[in-house]
Image: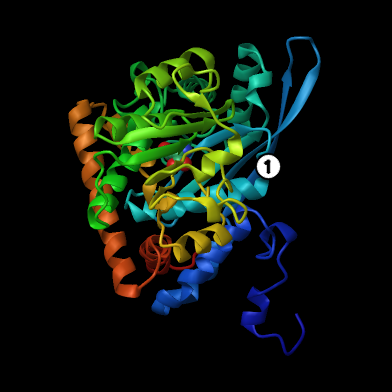
Amino acid sequence: MTSNSTPAAASNHPLPSYLDPKHLGPWGIYLQQVDRVTPYLGSLARWVETLKRPKRALIVDVPIEMDNGTIAHFEGYRVQHNLSRGPGKGGVRFHQDVTLSEVMALSAWMSIKNAAVNVPYGGAKGGIRVDPKTLSKGELERLTRRYTSEIGLLIGPSKDIPAPDVNTNGQIMSWMMDTYSMNTGATATGVVTGKPIDLGGSLGRVEATGRGVFTVGVEAAKLSGLALQGARVAVQGFGNVGGTAGKLFAEAGAIVVAVQDHTGTIFNAKGLDVPAVLEHVANTGGVGGFKGADKMANDDFWSVDCEILIPAALEGQINAKNAGKIKAKLVIEGANGPTTPEADDILTDKGVLVLPDVIANAGGVTVSYFEWVQDFSSFFWSEDEINARLVRIMQEAFAAVWQVAQENKVSLRTATFIIACRRILHAREMRGLYP
Ligand code: GLU
């Protein structure tokens, strides 16, 4: 440090490229979101830098023996963004495009999400850079177990609790739970959530994210005067999240007119038979080839006439190229990070109401919290009780976000960040710096 360096200058030591705010990608987007809320943090703004870097990030090499006898190496990650409010919590994603900076952003969004619905967790996320569709079941199991062992120094029921995310499920959670338990010498069901019911899983967990999407959608529709009866819905991604949300909207009288996933886009102006589409997806792995619908060019999905659009696939799907075409009045972000900041501005200028991921898809982690509590107490609740508690938490959190947005004349995303960042940084301040 030179003699005229100030402590402030020292804290602004040049950042490595992946922490650079100009870096385009999920982490850069997250940093812009934090910058937008800083003026609303009052004296807590002193701590805001805490949110702009992960507490810790682990990169692991995951070697496995392939069925053909060769040894393949995959890169895995576990990032704990913030632990001020409790243990780390967040999913594990298996996808060929996973990068450290993506996992960093996803872990940060978990910190915000967990604080927004006030579950007692920090934020974490993990992933492996792999296309799991190219692996046999045995290879997938060996990959999952080796990854779990490698991140074993970070995870644990009171340290950091993984869960399902893109391309991971109850089977993968079971292997993770077993590997951790065998390595530590005691069955620890609370080390992961999203487990099958027979292994300490919670009723309602599989549908929880979609149910949360539906719950905030209903609240937002009420507040903005949009009738659900006959409302047209378009959904991107028809797995746990998009599929459940589509089903619940259809049951509430809305019409699901278009669905897109990695196998194609299907459209029916009169409304798709959602249970039949779900069955087709369960049997074939995607919506492509579904009879009872017209095929549609993938690009045309974004300009479909609809009132509600639910992006429930991957990041960056609504961007500067397609945002202008969107006709929906309400966009409910089932996925994490589906809307780029440019697209967010385009939608806001058009008067589209965007329900941001950090509140809209928080139903999953909320029921993960219930699962973890049930595992700790070895006492399991009924599905009705779980759904009622989920709906109450989502409604209360959404009402608070709506109020902060009105009071400060900001977007629902910024309002959610204001609530969450205040909670995280207040915890941070009260705990103090130690050691
Ligand atoms: N992967 C989900 C999410 O992005 C759930 C995480 C969890 O339950 O811990 O919110």
Quarter occupied by the N terminus: bottom right
Tell me: residue 394, above or below residue 290: below
Task: Decide which of 244, 103 is in the foreground and name it.
Answer: 244
Residue 160 appears in the rendering: no
As helix, strand or loop, the secondary structure at mark 1 comes to strand
- The residue located at (46%, 28%) in the rendering is 239
Tell me: residue 108, above or below residue 207: below
Would you identify the image quadrant in which residue 364 lies? top left
Expressed as whole percent of the image width and height from the top left, the position of residue 68 reads: 78, 9
Residue 265 appears in the rendering: yes
Expressed as whole percent of the image width and height from the top left, the position of residue 292 reads: 44, 19
Inspect the image, locate mark 1, and give the three-letter code of the amino acid beneath it. Ile
Answer left or right for 215 relative to 365. left
Answer left or right for 369 relative to 62. left
Task: Decide which of 90, 187 is in the foreground and name it.
Answer: 90
Task: Decide which of 102, 407 is in the foreground and name it.
Answer: 407
Q: Which residue is mark 1?
A: 59
Would you identify the image quadrant in which residue 186 lies? top left
Mark 1: few/some/many CA within 10 Å (<14, 14-19, 20+): some
Expressed as whole percent of the image width and height from the top left, the position of residue 91 reads: 49, 37
